[in-house]
Image: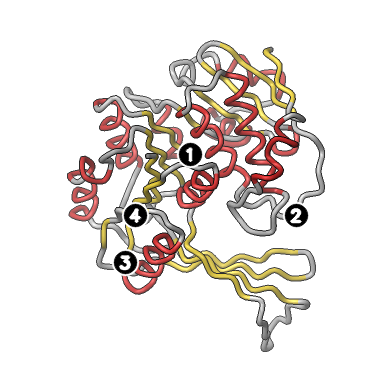
């Protein structure tokens, strides 16, 4: 089983409108609600790949119960920590080819709730040799929360991947105990290093501190594919050009593909091609964090990977 942790999950609500009228009433019957958050999205795609998934994080109130019930109805297991404050909503309004988002800040996690999570890691991770941590931290938590989970995973000989950004990413890559996999994009790498990152210097950056001791690094480059470091080798992955339907969640899908292939002991090329294929398949679907497995082989064969 693979555990995915989402510290700040949400109930995602999408409203589809022909026209978005400001300072007026907007009505629609095109409404989609789902349990959301980057880690949850990773879990959805892992499940579609055929993996048994466990979801965890913090949930509270009626919206927290909605998340647990939604995951259960999808046939997946959850081991969340219940908190005093309510889980957040994240609202997207789809209109005239645009997407306008309203993202609630979310609950504040108390020190007691944080410590409760860490103290229950044996129970939360039971049966899971692979752990993924994705997304931003809710109010009340800082990077040390992720660092404690990473240290626990390494002590227990469990694989751990982390997908985050900003100060949290900066702290994690500079910590004494590092994750096995990270998935930043070019700009996120530039932000933490406070330097300009380009295709010309990215390879050198990934092979030196603070990145050199992180075994897997997937540096996303959007439609241009990715630069991927595995141990001391660096690869360029190219993806075919497609007409994107919805790119939201493609990074989470790509991460799910990589974790899945790693868990199956695939070689470097297969890991990269599986990762890129899952990200591409997500782009071709209106639904976030969904891949059509019937198309997997077709696009897998179109991914080009070369060592650089």
Label ID, residue 71: none
Label ID, residue 245: 2
> Which residue is painted at 65% across and 18% down in the image?
235
* Distance Cα–Cα, label 2 vs label 1: 24 Å
| 205 relative to 115 in the view: left or right | right
Element type where label 2 sits in the image: loop
Q: Which residue is mark 1?
A: 163
- In front: label 2 or label 1: 2
- Asked if the residue under mark 2 is in contact with the one under mark 4, i.e. CB atoms within 8 Å, the reply is no
| Quarter of the rendering occupied by the N terminus | top left
* Distance Cα–Cα, label 1 vs label 4: 20 Å
- Asked if the residue under mark 1 is in contact with the one under mark 3, i.e. CB atoms within 8 Å, the reply is no
The answer to whether residue 98 is above or below residue 77 is below
Residue 242 percent coordinates (x, y): 81, 43
> Which residue is painted at 67% across and 88% down in the image?
25
* Distance Cα–Cα, label 3 vs label 2: 33 Å
Label 2 crowding class (10 Å Cα cut-off): few <14, some 14-19, many 20+?
few
N-terminal-most mark, 2 or 1: 1
- In front: label 4 or label 3: 4
Q: Which residue is mark 4?
A: 78
Q: How many marks?
A: 4
| Quarter of the rendering occupied by the C terminus | top right
Q: Nearer the viewer, residue 225 or 2?
A: 2
Q: Quadrant of residue 24?
A: bottom right
The answer to whether residue 133 is above or below residue 65 is above
Label ID, residue 60: 3
- Asked if the residue under mark 3 is in contact with the one under mark 4, i.e. CB atoms within 8 Å, the reply is no
Label 1 crowding class (10 Å Cα cut-off): few <14, some 14-19, many 20+?
many
Residue 17 percent coordinates (x, y): 72, 76
């Amino acid at each position: 089983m693979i555990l995915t942790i989402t510290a700040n999950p949400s109930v995602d609500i999408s409203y589809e409108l022909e026209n978005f009228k400001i300072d007026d009433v907007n009505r629609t019957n095109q409404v989609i609600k789902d349990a959301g958050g980057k880690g949850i999205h990773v879990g959805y795609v892992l499940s579609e790949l055929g993996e048994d998934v466990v979801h965890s994080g913090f949930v509270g109130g009626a919206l927290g119960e909605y998340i647990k019930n939604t995951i259960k109805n999808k046939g997946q297991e959850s081991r969340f920590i219940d908190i005093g404050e309510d889980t957040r909503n994240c609202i997207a309004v789809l209109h005239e080819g645009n997407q306008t988002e309203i993202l609630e800040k979310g609950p504040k996690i108390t020190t007691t709730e944080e410590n409760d999570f860490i103290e229950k890691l044996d129970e939360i991770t039971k049966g899971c040799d692979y752990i993924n941590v994705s997304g931003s931290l809710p109010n009340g938590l800082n990077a040390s929360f992720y660092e404690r989970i990473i240290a626990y995973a390494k002590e227990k000989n469990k694989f751990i991947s982390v997908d985050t950004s900003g100060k949290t990413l900066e702290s994690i890559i500079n910590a004494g105990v590092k994750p096995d996999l990270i998935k930043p994009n070019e700009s996120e790498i530039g932000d933490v290093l406070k330097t300009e990152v380009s295709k010309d210097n990215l390879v050198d950056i990934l092979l030196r501190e603070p990145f050199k001791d992180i075994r897997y690094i997937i540096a996303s480059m959007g439609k241009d594919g990715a630069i991927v470091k595995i141990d001391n080798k660096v690869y360029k992955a190219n993806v075919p050009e497609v007409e994107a339907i919805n790119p939201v969640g493609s990074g989470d899908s790509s991460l799910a593909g990589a974790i899945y292939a790693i868990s199956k002991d695939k070689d470097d090329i297969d890991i990269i091609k599986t990762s890129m294929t899952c990200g591409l398949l997500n782009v071709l679907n209106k639904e976030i964090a969904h891949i059509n497995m019937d198309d997997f082989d077709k696009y897998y064969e179109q991914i080009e990977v070369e060592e650089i």
